[in-house]
Image (cartoon, helix red, strand yellow):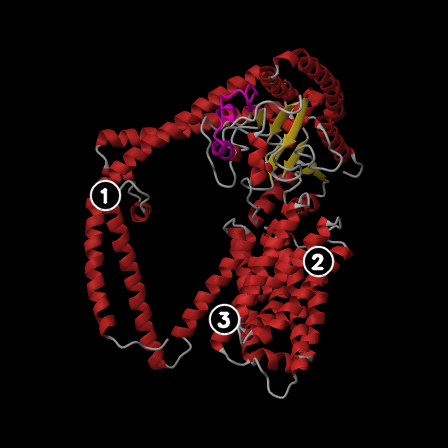
Amino acid sequence: MTAAAPASAAVRVVATTADLAALAAAIGGDLVEVQTIVPPGSDPEAFEPRPGDLDKVRRADILVRVGLGYDYWLDRLVGQIGDKRLMRGGEAYVDASAGIPLLEIRGQTVVNEGGHAHGVANPHYWLDPENAATVTAGIAEAFVRRAPAQAPGILAKREHFLAALDAALQRWIARLAPFAGVKLIAYHNSWPYFSRRFRLDVLDFVEPKPGVAPSPAHLARLIAEGRRSNVRAILHEPYEPEDSSRLLAQKLGVPFVLLATSVGSVAGVKDYLDLFEHNTAALAKALGAPGE
Amino acid sequence: MADALSLLLVPFAASVAFVLIHAYLGVHVLRRNIVFADLALAQLSALGATVAFALGYAPASPAGFGYALLFTAIGAALLTFTRGLSRIMSQEAFVGILYVVATAATILVVDRAPQGAEHVKKILIGNILTVGPPELAKFAALYAAIGLFHWLARKPLLAISNDAEPAGRGRLAVSLWDFMFFLSFGIVVTSSVTTAGVLLVFSFLIVPAVIGSLFSRKIDGVLPIAWGAGILASGAGLAGSYVLDLPTGAAMVAAFALLLVLAGLAGALLFLDAGRRRANWGIAARSAGLLVLMLTFAASLWLILNPAADQPLAALVEAATGIGPAQYLPARERELYADAARDMRRFQAEVDRLNAGERAARYQRAPLSDEEIRRIASYQQSFSEMTRGEGFVQDVLRTKARARERWIFGLPLALAALLGLGLLGRPLWRARPVRL
């Protein structure tokens, strides 16, 4: 079933999310042709594949996924295609979470504890720029397996990208350094990796469980907690309902900050570097604003 | 408590405004026999808002409202047209088709608009908790205007709602009034659905009107009861959602349903002449008894047949008597059961402690290295798996205990329930049915 003899020389990379796609594009340049399954700006944790995605996955030379139960729907797609190459352990398969130092571990088996699954560990690891080295290593390895002749090219491009990322990271860290330890409340538990890198304290979440809207009692608790701990901003993810976060921000008298959880989820965030450029700038602006 | 009051006051005021206009419109809708017209109109207005959204207008902008209004007007015209169709097919069927098609079209349009899913989610669920004073003022003004129109035009509007072919009115006039009714109705639900969500709006509309018509046939009798019931249910739902820590919209819908059941019971058991009241009390008591006995019999049979499955009866007996599954086990296994419970708590505490340490290190002290994070992760993984293992031990022992419980109280309860069913059922089978 493998469509061998590709018409173009470029290696076809299919990534489940825009972030992994952005990383593949960043290290692959014109050596790769990257496609994303979840459209930018929609919630990957609530995604339903379409018939066209089946075709996309079937024709992939490299298939990159977030793993950790985050894009669990990919298993069904791959199962339907039935191509060993695309399955766990196959030469085209890249689980980008392999090798990442994981946070908020729950166990080895995916469990669904009300709402949607944050199964094995918190899956939002691409929000720490340092993890890009691990993710791109996995992708580059699969690339070299597929096109060994082009190995030096991809490795050089990866080195180049990681150097640029590291330089930018020092700038972002410096930008948020004045706010180390700042108390925040987020809508969804998307930020543990981001918090670890940029030294933030996300105390609590507007949704009591992933995917569940807050009850009045929960909101009242958050208001009390926010006052007591001097919470300085409410972080909000695109594609989540805004009303509750806005109400909380208004009651606490703190800014409501829309952060990008993913490339393409906020206007102007077009690649992996933009993601952190936007998030650190938005956060610094909100926290540094006068009249706090 | 002050926080709770400040959180719930505006939503309650908004609910009162919603009840006042929706319960009134609900009386019309009930008489017209098209209870789902509100869903169809709300969905059409949502489709309009979504089209505007896909074209790049903000949902709250004048263009967004204009599109929503345009689609609502189209819906009103289509619903007006159904009166002519009512001789060929049921109006409700047409209303249903309109709703389904509008919903599907919304999904298709949203698919082309980035970040449209949130918009659709909001229309379905709403969030009455976050309504603010400016919105409340807008609702009050809009509903006052529409209420005034309905009061001024009450005669023709009621006439066409009460009768499919009202005497003494031309067809054109009927169609025109019909259109005006549906348009005003559409504007009301368009405004309320984005705040309260379709489920809650449907409850505001239908449940108070149904409660009102349980007790009265005349509109000036139905309305005060409907309003009172709606306001009571809204207050109870909001308070319940706070006290019991439940999602507000769903809790309010449940409160409306509960009030409807209570009103139905009150209607059958309290507000009747003495003879029928006594007969109904008898039936109610016997039915309740029969229901409890049947449930008990079914649950104890289930326990006897399949002790390893979820056992509502055994769980209930265990919770009520305080005698847990461990007490039914021999001493050795009872110890194992207690150990497993203790270990589960201990392992979970370890996982929590590791999590708290890692969280604190994100912003306090020196940051943890990747190696330290990996070590914590592997400990957590082991503890989580061990917790799950102990949980499995408990499950196995609980099943063993349940296998004993079925003979200790399952069988006696089943026999007692069977006996009770025989005794209680006999007079009911002999009695002549009494009109409720």
First in residue order: circle 2 vs circle 1:
2
First in residue order: circle 2 vs circle 3:
2
Q: Are marks 2 and 1 on the same chain?
A: yes
User: In this picture, which residue range is highlighted in magenta?
Assistant: A75-102
Per the image, the residue denoted by label 1 is B405
First in residue order: circle 1 vs circle 3:
3
Q: Residues within 10 Å of mark 1 (few under 14, many from 20)?
A: many
| Residue A7 coordinates in the image, percent (x, y) | 65, 25
Per the image, the residue denoted by label 3 is B211
Q: Specify the subunit that label 1 lies on.
A: B
* Camera-side residue of A141 and B406: A141
Residue farthest to the right? A290
In the image: residue B41, left or right of residue B402: right
Badge 1 vs badge 3, beta-carbon distance below 8 Å: no
**Residue A258 is inside the magenta segment:** no
What distance separates the C-alpha of mark 2 from that of mark 3? 29 Å
Q: Residue at x 38, y 82 (%)?
A: B273
Q: Specify the subunit that label 2 lies on.
A: B
Residue A270 occupies which quadrant of the picture? top right
What distance separates the C-alpha of mark 2 from that of mark 1? 58 Å
In the image: residue B146, left or right of residue B100: right
User: Disc 2 marks which amino acid?
Assistant: Glu
User: Disc 3 marks which amino acid?
Assistant: Ile
**Residue A101 is inside the magenta segment:** yes
Q: Specify the subunit that label 3 lies on.
A: B
Per the image, the residue denoted by label 2 is B135
Q: Residues within 10 Å of mark 3 (few under 14, many from 20)?
A: many
| Residue A237 coordinates in the image, percent (x, y) | 65, 38
